[in-house]
Image: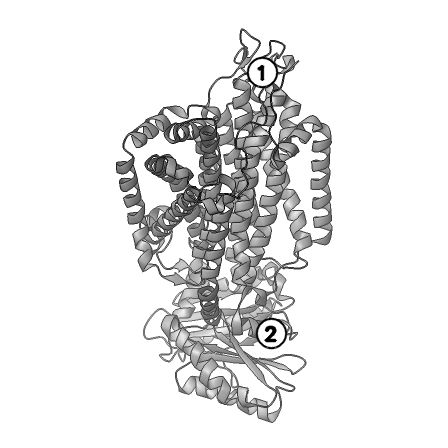
C-alpha cells in the first residue's frame, strides 16, 4: 500500500481533480452530457445576431436604430460605372449615350433589376461628373436584399456583355449584392480555411511536442468540446446581449489557445510526476494541486481581462467579451474536471510510444519516460544556454532586452487609426477597384452620410420644405455634394437623406456641420421632429469619442484587477507589479511592429497588402486579448517558481528550476498560438491581417524574449525582494503552490501493466 504523510489543506482545483480522477467515468459522462445538452439547446434556440445599430455609438446609433425600425423595404442597391477611356468622349457623346441605354436594356431584361436610373432621365437623373467623363447607372435588385447575391450573376453577365461590345469605355458593376457575390464568398472561404487549418496545425505541433498520439488528442478534445459547449451557451446568452457574426470565430481562436495551454501544462505536470516515480493517483493529485490551481488563476485572470470589454459600451466589444468569457470558462472547467478523469482512464498509456520498448520499467518498478519537446524537465539545450547566460549577467540581459522592446514599441507614437472601408479588402478583387474608381469620381458616394429624420408625417409640406433646405444648405456650403437621395418609409414617419461627403478631416468637418448647424436650422427646427446622422464617417467619429471616454476605464479595470489577482495568488506585491510591467512591454512592442508593418509598409509585398492606417478597433482589442493570454505563461511560470521557492530554494535557484521545468511546454504552447494566429495574417481582409500579425508577434515576443530573458533577469536582480509583501497585507491567505501530499517510497507501487505492455 501507499503510505501518506501529512496532508495540507487542499485547494478547489485539487479537490475537483481528485474527485474527477476517483470517479473518472462519472466525470467524463457528466462533461459529455453537458457538452451535448449545451450544443443541442444552443442549436435549437439559435444565436441572436446584433442589429446593425448595436455596433455603433452616440448619434450614429440613434440614427441607425430609427432606420432599422422604420420598415424600409429590404433592397440591394447596385450601380454601374460608365467611364470614358479617351479624353474626347463625354457623357454627351453618342457612344456613351448608346452604352448607357444598352446597360439599361440589358439589366432590365434579366428580370432582376428595378427602378433603373440613368444620367439622361428627366427627373432625378443618376449622377455624372462635372467634366462629363464619368456617370453612373443606378438600379435596385428585385426581391429581398439579403439574398440578392444569389440572383445577381445574370445581371453581372449582362453588364459584362455590354463592356465587351464597348471596349472604349469602362463599364463595371458594384454594389451590395455584387460585392457579396464577387468578394464576400472569397472572404467567407478565408474564414473557413483559417478555421480548418487551425486544428491540423495544432495537432502537428502537439504530435511533435509529445511524440505520441494520446497527448495530442486529449488537449484537442478538451479544447473542442469546451468550444462546442461555449457556443451553445452563447446562443442562450445572446438572447440578452446580441453578438456579432465574427464572435464564434474569435471564440474558436481563444478556446483553442487557452484549452491547449491548460491541457499542456496539466498533462506535462502529471507526466513529470510519473517520471519521478509517483503512483498514477498521486501524480494526478499533484498535477491537480499545482497545474490545476494555476489553470484556475490563469483562467480567472483571462476572464477578468475579457470582462474589461464590457466597459466600452460598444455592442461588438461586449459580444466579444461575452463569447470569450464563456469559452475560457468552459475550457477552465474542462481542464480541472474531465482532463484529470481522462488521464486517470488512460493512465501511462498517455505517454506510450508506438515503437516497442521506449517506455521502460526501472529496477524498482518505476516507469522511465523519454524526454521530448513537450515534456523536457530541463527545458532543452537552447533554453538552458539562454537561461544560464541571463542569470550570469542579469543587468546586461535586462537593459538590452528592455531596450530592444522599447525600440520596437517606439513607432506606436506615430500610429494612425482608421475605420475599415473598401480598402479593408486586399488582394486581386476587381470589384474593389471598381468601388475605388466610383469613389474617386464621386467622393463619399459609396459611404455617404445618412440623416435619419423621424416625425409624425415626414411627407407634410413643412417637413418636405425642411428636407429640401437641408439638402440645399449642405450642397451650397460645400458640406456635401452629389449624389444626394431621399427615401421615405411606407408609414411616412421616417425619411433618410443620403449626402455624399469627403473623407478624413473633410468628412469629420462635414459630420460636425450637419449635426451642429445644418440639421438644427432645418429639419431639427420642426416641432416634434428628431434627426441624427449616421454613416461610415459619423460612426467613426462616434466610435473614436466612445473609445476616448471608455478606453482608460478598460485599461484601469484590467490592470487593477489583474494586479489584485496576482497579489492574492502569489502574496507578493513585487511579482504582481513585475507581471503587469512585462505584459505591457510585450503588448507595446506588438503595437510598434503593427505600425512598422502595416503603416510603414515593411513586409507589404510578402503579406500582400497596401500600407495604410491601423484599424481603429484593433489596439484596445489587442490589449485585452493579449493581456489575458500573456497571463497564461506568467501564472504558470510563477507558480513553478513559487513552488520551488516554498520548497527551500533560493530565489535564483527557484527561478532556474521553475523556468527549466516549464520551458518545453511553453515553447509548444507558444508555437501553437503563433501558428494559428499567423494563419489569419493570410486573409483578404486587412483588419484580420493586422489582428493575426499583432497576436502572433505579441505571443512570440512574450513567450521568448519576455519569459526567457526579462522575467528571470529581473527576478535575479530583485532577489528576496521579489517576494516582498507589506505587513499591512499580511492578512492575505497563503495558498499552497506545492504538492498536497507526500508519498513515501513503497516497493508495492507498480506501474499500470496495461500502460507498459
Q: Judging from the image, what secondary structure is the residue with disc 1 in?
A: loop
Residue 15, by quadrant, is: top right
Quarter placement of the C terminus = top right
Counting residues from the start of the chain, the first of labels 2 and 1 encountered is 2
Q: Which residue is mark 1?
A: 744
Q: Nearer the viewer, mark 2 or mark 1?
A: 1
511 vs 33, left or right, is left
Residue 608 can be seen in this image: no
Query: 145 above or below 126?
Result: above
Give the image location of residue 339, x and y in percent. Answer: 62, 32
Give the image location of residue 504, x and y in percent. Answer: 38, 70
Which mark, residue 67?
Answer: 2
Residue farthest toward the front in the current orientation of the protein? 727
Along the viewing direction, whichever of 666 and 118 lies nearer the viewer: 666
Query: 151 above or below 694?
Result: below
Residue 680 can be seen in this image: yes
Q: Residue at x 39, y 38 (%)?
A: 722
Which mark, residue 722?
Answer: none
Quarter placement of the N terminus = top right
Amino acid at each position: 500500500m501507499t503510505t501518506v504523510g501529512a496532508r495540507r489543506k487542499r485547494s478547489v482545483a485539487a479537490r475537483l481533480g481528485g474527485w474527477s480522477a476517483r470517479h473518472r467515468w462519472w466525470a467524463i459522462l457528466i462533461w459529455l452530457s453537458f457538452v451535448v445538452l449545451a450544443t443541442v439547446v444552443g442549436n435549437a434556440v439559435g444565436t441572436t445576431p446584433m442589429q446593425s445599430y448595436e455596433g455603433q455609438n452616440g448619434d450614429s446609433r440613434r440614427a441607425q436604430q430609427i432606420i432599422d425600425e422604420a420598415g424600409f423595404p429590404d433592397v440591394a442597391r447596385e450601380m454601374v460605372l460608365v467611364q470614358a477611356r479617351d479624353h474626347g468622349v463625354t457623357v454627351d457623346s453618342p457612344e456613351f449615350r448608346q452604352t448607357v441605354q444598352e446597360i439599361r436594356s440589358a439589366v432590365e431584361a434579366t428580370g432582376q433589376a428595378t427602378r433603373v436610373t440613368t444620367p439622361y432621365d428627366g427627373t432625378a437623373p443618376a449622377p455624372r461628373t462635372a467634366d462629363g467623363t464619368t456617370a453612373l447607372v443606378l438600379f435596385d435588385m428585385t426581391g429581398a436584399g439579403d439574398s440578392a447575391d444569389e440572383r445577381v450573376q445574370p445581371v453581372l453577365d449582362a453588364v459584362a456583355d455590354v463592356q465587351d461590345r464597348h471596349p472604349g469605355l469602362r463599364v463595371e458593376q458594384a454594389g451590395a449584392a455584387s460585392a457579396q457575390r464577387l468578394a464576400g464568398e472569397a472572404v467567407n472561404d478565408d474564414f473557413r480555411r483559417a478555421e480548418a487549418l487551425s486544428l491540423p496545425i495544432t495537432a502537428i505541433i502537439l504530435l511533435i511536442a509529445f511524440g505520441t498520439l494520446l497527448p495530442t488528442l486529449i488537449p484537442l478534445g478538451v479544447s473542442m468540446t469546451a468550444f462546442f459547449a461555449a457556443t451553445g451557451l452563447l446562443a442562450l446568452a445572446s438572447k440578452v446581449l446580441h453578438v456579432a457574426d465574427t464572435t464564434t470565430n474569435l471564440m474558436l481562436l481563444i478556446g483553442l489557445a487557452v484549452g491547449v495551454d491548460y491541457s499542456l501544462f496539466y498533462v506535462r505536470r502529471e507526466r513529470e510526476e510519473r517520471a519521478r516515480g509517483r503512483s498514477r493517483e498521486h501524480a494526478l493529485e499533484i498535477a491537480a494541486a499545482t497545474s490545476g490551481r494555476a489553470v484556475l488563476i490563469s483562467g480567472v485572470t483571462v476572464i477578468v481581462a475579457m470582462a474589461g470589454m464590457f466597459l466600452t459600451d460598444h455592442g461588438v466589444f461586449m459580444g466579444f467579451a461575452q463569447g470569450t468569457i464563456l469559452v475560457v470558462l468552459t475550457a477552465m472547467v474542462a481542464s480541472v474536471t474531465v482532463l484529470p478523469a481522462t488521464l486517470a482512464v488512460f493512465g501511462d498509456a498517455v505517454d506510450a510510444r508506438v515503437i516497442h520498448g521506449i517506455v521502460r520499467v526501472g529496477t524498482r518498478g518505476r516507469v522511465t519516460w523519454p524526454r521530448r519537446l513537450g515534456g523536457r524537465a530541463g527545458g532543452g539545450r537552447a533554453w538552458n544556454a539562454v537561461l544560464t547566460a541571463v542569470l550570469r549577467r542579469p543587468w546586461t540581459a535586462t537593459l538590452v532586452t528592455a531596450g530592444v522592446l522599447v525600440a520596437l514599441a517606439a513607432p506606436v507614437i506615430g500610429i494612425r487609426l482608421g475605420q475599415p472601408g473598401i480598402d479593408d479588402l486586399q488582394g486581386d478583387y476587381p470589384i474593389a477597384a471598381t468601388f475605388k474608381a466610383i469613389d474617386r469620381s464621386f467622393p463619399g458616394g459609396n459611404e455617404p452620410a445618412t440623416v435619419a429624420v423621424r416625425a409624425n408625417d415626414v411627407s407634410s409640406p413643412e417637413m418636405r420644405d425642411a428636407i429640401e433646405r437641408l439638402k440645399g444648405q449642405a450642397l451650397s456650403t460645400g458640406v456635401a455634394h452629389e449624389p444626394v437621395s431621399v427615401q421615405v418609409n411606407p408609414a411616412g414617419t421616417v425619411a433618410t437623406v443620403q449626402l455624399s461627403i469627403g473623407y478624413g478631416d473633410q468628412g469629420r468637418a462635414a459630420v460636425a456641420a450637419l449635426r451642429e448647424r445644418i440639421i438644427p436650422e432645418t429639419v431639427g427646427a420642426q416641432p416634434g421632429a428628431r434627426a441624427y446622422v449616421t454613416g461610415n464617417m459619423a460612426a467613426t467619429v462616434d466610435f473614436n469619442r466612445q473609445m476616448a471616454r471608455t478606453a482608460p476605464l478598460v485599461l484601469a479595470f484590467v490592470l487593477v484587477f489583474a494586479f489584485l489577482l496576482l497579489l492574492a495568488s502569489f502574496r507578493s506585491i513585487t511579482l504582481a507589479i513585475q507581471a503587469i510591467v512585462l505584459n505591457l512591454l510585450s503588448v507595446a512592442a506588438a503595437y510598434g511592429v503593427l505600425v512598422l508593418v502595416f503603416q510603414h509598409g515593411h513586409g507589404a509585398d510578402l503579406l500582400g497588402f497596401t500600407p495604410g492606417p491601423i484599424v481603429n478597433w484593433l489596439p484596445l482589442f489587442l490589449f485585452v486579448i493579449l493581456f489575458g493570454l500573456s497571463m497564461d505563461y506568467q501564472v504558470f511560470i510563477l507558480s513553478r517558481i513559487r513552488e520551488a521557492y516554498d520548497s527551500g530554494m533560493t530565489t535564483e535557484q527557484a527561478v532556474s528550476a521553475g523556468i527549466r521545468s516549464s520551458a518545453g511546454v511553453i515553447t509548444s504552447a507558444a508555437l501553437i498560438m503563433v501558428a494559428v494566429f499567423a494563419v489569419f495574417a493570410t486573409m483578404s481582409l486587412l483588419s484580420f491581417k493586422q489582428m493575426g500579425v499583432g497576436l502572433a508577434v505579441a505571443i512570440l515576443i512574450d513567450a521568448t524574449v519576455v519569459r526567457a530573458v526579462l522575467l528571470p533577469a529581473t527576478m535575479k536582480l530583485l532577489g528576496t525582494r521579489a517576494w516582498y509583501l507589506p505587513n499591512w497585507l499580511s492578512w492575505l491567505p497563503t495558498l499552497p503552490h506545492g504538492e498536497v501530499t507526500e508519498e513515501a517510497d513503497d516497493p508495492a507501487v507498480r506501474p499500470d501493466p496495461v500502460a507498459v505492455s
